[in-house]
């Protein structure tokens, strides 16, 4: 059997991550993620407008030609303990460009200073803010990566359960939807994903969930009833430790009559989109998400 060569660009990202190992101290971990995602220059044609949503720092980004009546509410990754507007700004801005809409990224409260349900409360506040600002629900998309992908799913569940109108669609990148991290790929992909490992995930899961159980549906949406959710695009990498739970979530959502598009990207690691300026597969994945969003937010 012939072995297919690994994408050399993702190997370069692996080498980069190996040279910048995750530190033990939380403050240093936060600085590291901001540096990883925020080290790429923002294109000069992107307009950035800082704002606040019920006291939560946030920012709008907009590329030329964006439809101001459509918006992507973005929830960054970082294990609920790290990540920021800075760490994900280039990725979010590119997603907005590809989807042809404005983006509103939230700097939601982080654990352990603010455990569950603080992040979920902030995400819901962001969605309510968009509705109150006059955006039609069918012209809103919600997206997020890793913990932000899990938070996106939890936000959809809370929107449904509170009787709010659903957004037009949602985009989940490498979603962390099982805080027990019990899937087989946690072990089988441990050697190929330099971003997240089970021991680390269990550590930060305990910081985030506080007194809530790991199987609480709004903490781990894999254990929720998924009926009534809007169309979902789920993108996972074949080399990432969260592969199996992303696939399982797609299967459970599909069984609940949710329209699901699942993409498994060969060779890709956890949230490869962050590195899109130097990774063609990252640019292609964001472009696919843009096309999906355009389709589902169409008139």
Image (tube, rainbow, N blue to C red):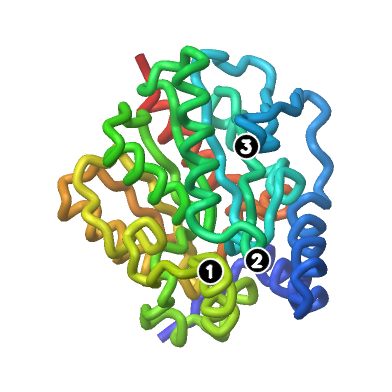
User: Marks 1 and 2, how far apart in space?
Assistant: 7 Å
Mark sitting earlier along the chain (1/2):
2
Q: Is residue 255 left or right of residue 248?
A: left
The image shows residue 53, relative to residue 178, as above or below, that is above
Q: Tell which of 251 and 135 is nearer to you.
A: 135
Residue 230 position, x and y percent, is 29, 37
- For label 3, the crowd category at 10 Å Cα-Cα, with few meaning under 14, some 14 to 19 and many 20 or more, is many
At x 44%, y 54%, the residue is 235
**Residue identifier under label 1:** 267
Q: Is residue 98 left or right of residue 260?
A: right
Q: Nearer the viewer, mark 2 or mark 3?
A: 3
- For label 1, the crowd category at 10 Å Cα-Cα, with few meaning under 14, some 14 to 19 and many 20 or more, is some
At x 68%, y 18%, the residue is 64
Disc marking residue 212:
none
Residue 93 appears in the picture as rendered: no
The image shows residue 260, relative to residue 293, as above or below, that is below
Disc marking residue 10:
2
Disc 1, disc 2: CB below 8 Å? Answer: yes
The image shows residue 170, relative to residue 293, as above or below, that is below
The image shows residue 149, relative to residue 52, as above or below, that is below
**Residue identifier under label 3:** 105
Residue 216 position, x and y percent, is 34, 64
Q: Quadrant of the C terminus?
A: top left
């Amino acid at each position: 059997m012939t072995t297919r060569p690994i994408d050399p660009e993702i190997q370069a990202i692996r080498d980069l991550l190996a040279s910048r190992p995750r530190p033990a101290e939380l403050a240093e971990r936060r600085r590291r993620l901001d540096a990883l995602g925020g080290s790429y220059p923002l294109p000069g044609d992107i307009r950035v407008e800082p704002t606040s949503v019920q006291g939560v720092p946030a920012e709008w980004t907009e590329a030329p030609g964006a439809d101001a009546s459509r918006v992507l509410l973005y929830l960054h990754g970082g294990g609920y303990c790290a990540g920021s507007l800075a760490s994900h700004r280039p990725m979010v801005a590119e997603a907005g460009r590809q989807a042809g809409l404005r983006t509103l990224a939230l700097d939601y409260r982080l654990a352990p200073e603010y455990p569950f349900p603080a992040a979920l409360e902030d995400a819901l506040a962001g969605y309510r803010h968009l509705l109150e600002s006059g955006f039609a629900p069918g012209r809103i998309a919600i997206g997020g990566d890793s913990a932000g992908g899990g938070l996106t799913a939890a936000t959809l569940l809370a929107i449904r359960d509170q009787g709010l109108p659903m957004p037009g669609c949602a985009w989940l990148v490498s979603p962390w939807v099982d805080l027990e991290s019990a899937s087989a790929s946690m072990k089988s992909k441990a050697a190929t994903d330099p971003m997240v490992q089970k021991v680390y995930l269990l550590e930060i899961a305990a910081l985030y969930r506080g007194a809530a159980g790991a199987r609480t549906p709004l903490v781990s949406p894999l254990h929720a009833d998924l009926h009534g959710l809007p169309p979902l695009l789920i993108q996972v990498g074949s080399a990432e430790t969260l592969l199996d739970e992303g696939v399982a979530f797609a299967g459970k959502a599909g069984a609940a009559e949710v329209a699901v598009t699942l993409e498994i990207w060969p060779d890709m690691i956890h949230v490869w989109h962050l590195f899109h300026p130097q990774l063609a597969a990252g640019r292609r994945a964001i472009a696919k998400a843009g096309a999906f969003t355009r389709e589902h937010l169409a008139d």
